[in-house]
Image: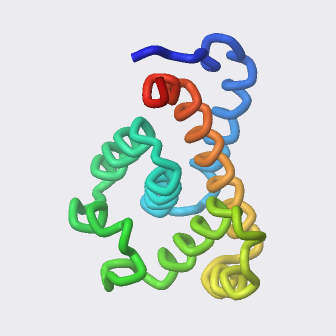
Amino acid sequence: MKTRLNPYALVGEGIQALLAVEKYLHGSGIEHSLLHLIKMRASQMNGCAYCLHMHSKDARAGGESEQRLYLLDAWRESVMYTPRERAALAWTEALTDITNGHADDAVYEEVRGSFSEKEVADLTVAIMMINGWNRLTVQASSAARSG
């Protein structure tokens, strides 16, 4: 596989700053299991195989069931996710897919019904981070898919 560029080697200081944000999120109070679901769902939407592999492994190590990971792509149709998880997954989708506009007010109200303002801010940062990681990873290997 041909790699376009390796941002991890080229901008190490920037990557370290991103890792500091990840460290913050790890201690933010948002359940680690929920952070894994957010990372998995955004990575599914973005087609990032590397991140899906990594975060599914991390989720399993944290006690997540295979069944819930398999059904994550169809979380709306499954009864296996809590209302809090559903709100976070809806927020994840709304912030990941912004091609049709901004996150809908109804989705925001749903997430606010399950999370404090600080938690919504932390979720938003977590979603921003996984979308960024997905883009770093996908751009580095997309040359192999397109060429």
* Residue 120 vertical placement versus 129 (above, below): below
Between 51 and 4, the one lying in front of the other is 4
Q: Which corner quadrant of the image does residue 90 belong to?
A: bottom right
Give the image location of residue 39, x and y in percent: 50, 53
Left or right for 142, reference 77: right
User: Residue extending furthest left?
Assistant: 66
**In percent of the image, x 54 and y 32: which residue is there?**
137
Q: Position of residue 109 (x, y in %)?
A: 71, 86
Compared across the picture, whether 74 is left or right of 67 comes to right
**What's the residue at 44%, 60% (across, down)?**
37
The furthest residue to the front:
147
**Up/down of 18 relative to 140, above or below:** below
Q: Position of residue 42 (x, y in %)?
A: 52, 56
**Height in image: 41 above or below 23?**
below
Seen at 76% across and 84% down, the residue is 105
Dividing the image into 4 quarters, which one contains the N terminus? top left
Taking depth in this image into account, of 100 and 64 the one nearest to the observer is 100
Residue 62, percent from left and from top: 33, 52
Query: In this rendering, does residue 71 appear at all?
Result: yes
Residue 135 vs residue 74: left or right? Answer: right
**Which residue shows up at 73% across the image and 73% down it?**
103
For residue 23, say whether it is visible. no
Identify whether 84 is placed above or below 58.
below
